[in-house]
Amino acid sequence: MSEVKQVHLVRHGEVNNPTGVLYGRLPGYHLSATGQAMAERLGEWFANTPVDHLRCSPLERAQETMAPIAEGREICVVTDARLIEADNAFAGKVFGKYNKPLLDPRNWWLLRDPFTPSWGEPYPQLAARMLSAIDEVVAGLPTGGQAVLVSHQLPIWTTRLALEEHSFVHDPRRRQCILASVTTLRYRDDTFCGLTYAEPARDLLRENGNRAFSSGH
């Protein structure tokens, strides 16, 4: 029986976002001081892991989270747009305590279908691009090899739903994918055979509930 290959899907650390903007794919959003500490924790978490491949979303928060993981390794980080945050029509909006953009009649057409969802990138499309990148990585790993991919909450969670053959329809508050978490996919003979989940930086996490229209954060 062949050795198992592993792909570690890492969610980035906390972002500096004092005004509470739903930033989505917008540029210029960097890790906060806490997020940097989370990234350092991930670097420590993977320090003794023999990693063969590193791949990352192009967004700043993901690149900054990858930096401590990549430090000291003779591996180039591949930037892959397929790992980017989900697209979201509400990007740039501030929801606040009362979710004000949802009360604006001009936005109601965007809310017509919560199951696609109509305000953002369709779940099947999101899962397909993520799985395309992951399958490419798995195919290139040596027997027993490991890879670290840094992405975002909704892309990681949607990938997990697809691999475990669950419905894409879900409550965002119930996603098991906190900041700086690690979802490890296992592959035998390049076929998915299970996963594990870890939270190396849970003690650094602040109370920061997921919004229904978040694009992963």
Image (tube, rainbow, N blue to C red):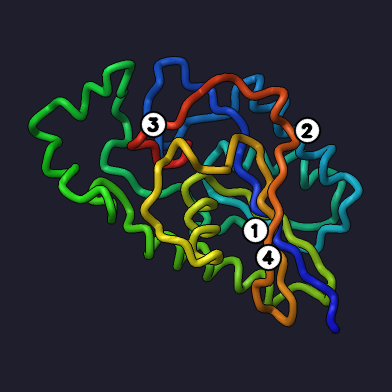
Q: Which residue is mark 2?
A: 41
Q: Are marks 3 and 2 in contact (CB under 8 Å)?
A: no
Crowding at label 2, few (<14), some or many (≥20) Cα neighbours within 10 Å? many
Q: Which label's residue is closer to the chain start, 1 or 2?
A: 2
Q: Are marks 3 and 4 in contact (CB under 8 Å)?
A: no
Q: Which residue is mark 3?
A: 211
Q: Which label's residue is closer to the chain start, 3 or 4?
A: 4
Q: Which label's residue is closer to the chain start, 1 or 3?
A: 1
- Residue at 53 percent of width and 45 percent of height: 152
Q: Which residue is mark 1?
A: 78
**Horizontal and vertical percent position of residue 132:** 52, 70
Report the side of 7 relative to 154 (left or right). right
**Quadrant in the rendering for residue 62:** top right
Q: Secondary structure at mark 3?
A: loop
Q: Distance from label 4 to label 2 (Cα)?
A: 25 Å
**Horizontal and vertical percent position of residue 181:** 66, 41
Q: Which residue is mark 4?
A: 194
Circle 1: residue type: Val
Crowding at label 4, few (<14), some or many (≥20) Cα neighbours within 10 Å? some
Crowding at label 1, few (<14), some or many (≥20) Cα neighbours within 10 Å? few
In the orientation shown, which residue stands out farthest toward the right? 48
Q: Secondary structure at mark 4?
A: strand
